[in-house]
Amino acid sequence: MQGCIKCGHRAIRRRRGFVEKILCEASYYCDNCGARWNDYRPFFAIFQRYAHCPRCHTPDLTRLTRRDKIDSMSSNPLRFLLLFVGAPLYHCTFCRLQFRDWRGLDPERPGRHR
Ligand SMILES: [Zn+2]
Ligand SMILES: [Zn+2]
């Protein structure tokens, strides 16, 4: 079940408009804090402004200076190529996946004060 990206409250799926149906797998809103967000289809996720976990889509990531050998690493060959362009390495707080992404961290992401 999806939780709110801001407050962790249970998220409610909302109806998508025509464009959103093409771009997104699902749209959600939170009736606790009013947050709205979309789960973009993997292809369109590259147009998102900030880095998100490719597995669970959370923006709640930690930047790593080097790879952690215990946690799993994304096997996406595209992300492997990012190693050679010096893209930063991120670690997902929830599913513990490590991956490279050329985008920065979302300044509005939850848990940034942890
Ligand atoms: Zn919320
Ligand atoms: Zn994740």
Image (cartoon, rainbow, N blue to C red):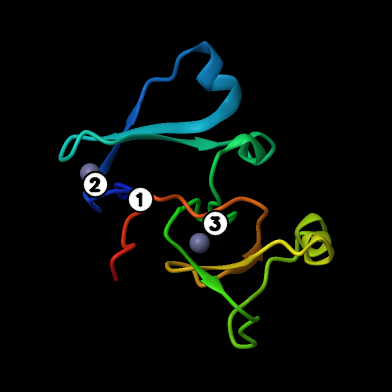
Which residue bears the numbered disc 1?
1
| Along the viewing direction, whichever of 20 and 2 lies nearer the viewer | 20
Residue at x 31% of width, y 50% of height: 3
Residue 73: which quarter of the image?
bottom right
Point out the image quarter for the C terminus. Answer: bottom left
First along the sequence among labels 1 and 3: 1
Q: For mark 2, does the 10 Å Cα neighbourhood hold few (<14), some (14 to 19), or many (20 or more) residues?
A: some
CA distance for labels 3 and 2: 19 Å
First along the sequence among labels 3 and 2: 2
Residue at x 65% of width, y 34% of height: 44
- Decide: marks 2, 1 in contact (CB < 8 A)? yes
Residue 30: which quarter of the image?
top left
**Pair 2/1: label in front:** 2
First along the sequence among labels 2 and 1: 1
**Residue 78's mark?**
none
**Left or right of 3, for residue 85:** right
Which residue bears the numbered disc 3?
53
Which residue bears the numbered disc 2?
10
CA distance for labels 2 and 1: 8 Å
Q: Amino acid at mark 1?
A: Met
Q: Ligand 2 near label 3 (Cβ, under 8 Å)?
A: yes
| Along the viewing direction, whichever of 10 and 113 lies nearer the viewer | 113
Residue 17 image point, x, y percent: 46, 14
Residue at x 56% of width, y 75% of height: 64
Residue placed farthest to the bottom in the image? 70
Residue at x 18% of width, y 35% of height: 31
Q: Ligand 1 near label 1 (Cβ, under 8 Å)?
A: no
